[in-house]
Amino acid sequence: MSVAAPDIRRKLRVLADAAKFDASCASSGSKRSGGKGLGSTQGMGICHSYTPDGRCISLLKVLLTNVCVYDCAYCINRRSSDVERATFEPEELVRLTMDFYRRNYIEGLFLSSGIRKSADDTLLRMIEVARLLRERESFGGYIHLKAVAGASEALAQRAGLYADRVSVNIELPKDTDLQRLAPEKRSSQIEGSMSAIRSAIDESRSSRRRARAKPPRVAPAGQSTQMIIGATPAQDRDVLHTASRLYAHHRLRRVYYSAFSPIPHASLALPTKPAPLVREHRLYQADWLLRFYGFDVDEVTPSSAPALDLDIDPKLAWALAHRERFPVHLDTAPREMLLRVPGLGVRSVQRILSMRRQHKVTLESLRALRVPLRKVSPFIVTSDAHHGASQLLDRQDLRRRLLPATQLPLFGQTHG
């Protein structure tokens, strides 16, 4: 590989950099010091992701090609963009993946691509990378394939035979926005690919239940998608309605939200300033409420307030707007109401429910659970302290008193 190494490094530099805009890898950059060969990441291509069982793994995150026949206004790799282009041959990417893997730099591959000739041609080449890794190299690591919307149903389903997770980007929250900024794409086409993947996953699970000799699992980690936030006037309410529908119709494992960042030589139809990262953070928190806390979109973003509050988390915002529902007594309140208490996460609620079968819940019990008492106190009553929750709830300055004391993280996966 010594002759090809400089060209491979150039391709890796170009195509790893082009892949950084895809948030559905749940990535954060990694940089290793040391050698100058292919095994040296130099900050290129390594991201962190989480498996279904919660393990953090390192992935080679790269595009097969950044050549694209589409001209989506928001994409740095659009047809009219003046960027350096590169394309991996499947064999090159297989060798690169195995080279990184043998050096213990990665545990898997996240592979996306521009559309070089057609959706079918591109997805077929991506599948070939995964097939060679699985069948020829006996690669047992994690593989995430970013399937190509519009590819044939058979190819979309076949991708799941080799990948742990398959995903198709919904791109933008509203179909009208997609028509304006990416007229060559259709949301119906994108969701058609999602439906094909879901059908393949469902059929695989059904076949495995019926068969004695278990057939291969299809995309055992399910499918996900990504939405760009802030590239259009779509409100958070629109974003969450789209996410909620996708979860229900296609049983997605995850919707990722990517704050829009201006790109070089951008269309005049796009904003000139980036979307605030805190908005991305709030959307992740709201998404968590929809999936695990029993909230619906109209509660989190009512028609009277379609944008999430950027200063406080959405559960606290809901509680402050519905003070009549509080305080709740921790010894008697149902699980559904405990989950709506700001500062109580799913795990804390489960522990409180287990605890109260044995004894009453006290302030000391909450301290032992590391519950943030400053945040929780206005909304609860415990058996040992009726600590003026009602009076706190009536305070006009309660919102100000509960503002976070520290700077918000950039990535939203808060569980409380």
Image: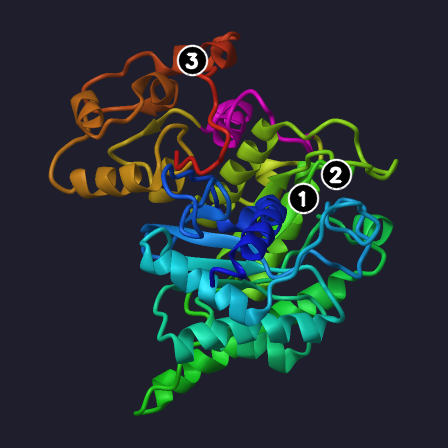
Which residue is label 1 attached to?
Answer: 228
Determine which of the numbered discs, if any, sits on residue 240 in the image: none
Q: Which residues are magenta?
A: 305-325
Could you tell me how far apart the alpha carbons at marks 2 and 3 are, in whole angstroms? 30 Å
Determine which quarter of the picture holds residue 139. Answer: bottom left
Q: Which residue does the image show at 84% across and 54% down from the upper left?
A: 179
Q: Could you tell me if the residues under marks 1 and 2 are in contact, i.e. CB atoms within 8 Å?
A: yes
Front-lying residue, 107 or 408: 107
Judge whether 138 appears above or below 185 on screen.
below
Q: SS at mark 2?
A: loop
Q: Position of residue 14 (x, y in %)?
A: 62, 48
* Image depth: mark 2 or mark 3 in front: 2
Could you tell me how far apart the alpha carbons at marks 1 and 2 are, in whole angstroms? 7 Å
- Please name the colour scheme applied to the rendered image: rainbow
Neighbours of disc 3 within 10 Å: few (<14), some (14-19), many (20+):
few
Q: Position of residue 88 (x, y in %)?
A: 60, 63
Under mark 3, the amino acid is Ala
Which residue is label 2 attached to?
Answer: 231
Judge whether 5 appears above or below 369 on screen.
below
Q: Position of residue 138 (x, y in %)?
A: 35, 75
Left or right of 225? Residue 411 is left
Judge whether 338 appears above or below 73 on screen.
above
Under mark 1, the amino acid is Ile
Front-lying residue, 182 or 294: 182
Determine which of the numbered discs, if any, sits on residue 405 in the image: 3
Neighbours of disc 2 within 10 Å: few (<14), some (14-19), many (20+):
many
Front-lying residue, 338 or 59: 59
Under mark 2, the amino acid is Ala
Q: Could you tell me if the residues under marks 2 and 3 are in contact, i.e. CB atoms within 8 Å?
A: no
Front-lying residue, 258 or 19: 19
Determine which quarter of the picture holds residue 228. Answer: top right
Q: Which residue does the image show at 59% across and 43% down from the upper left?
A: 257
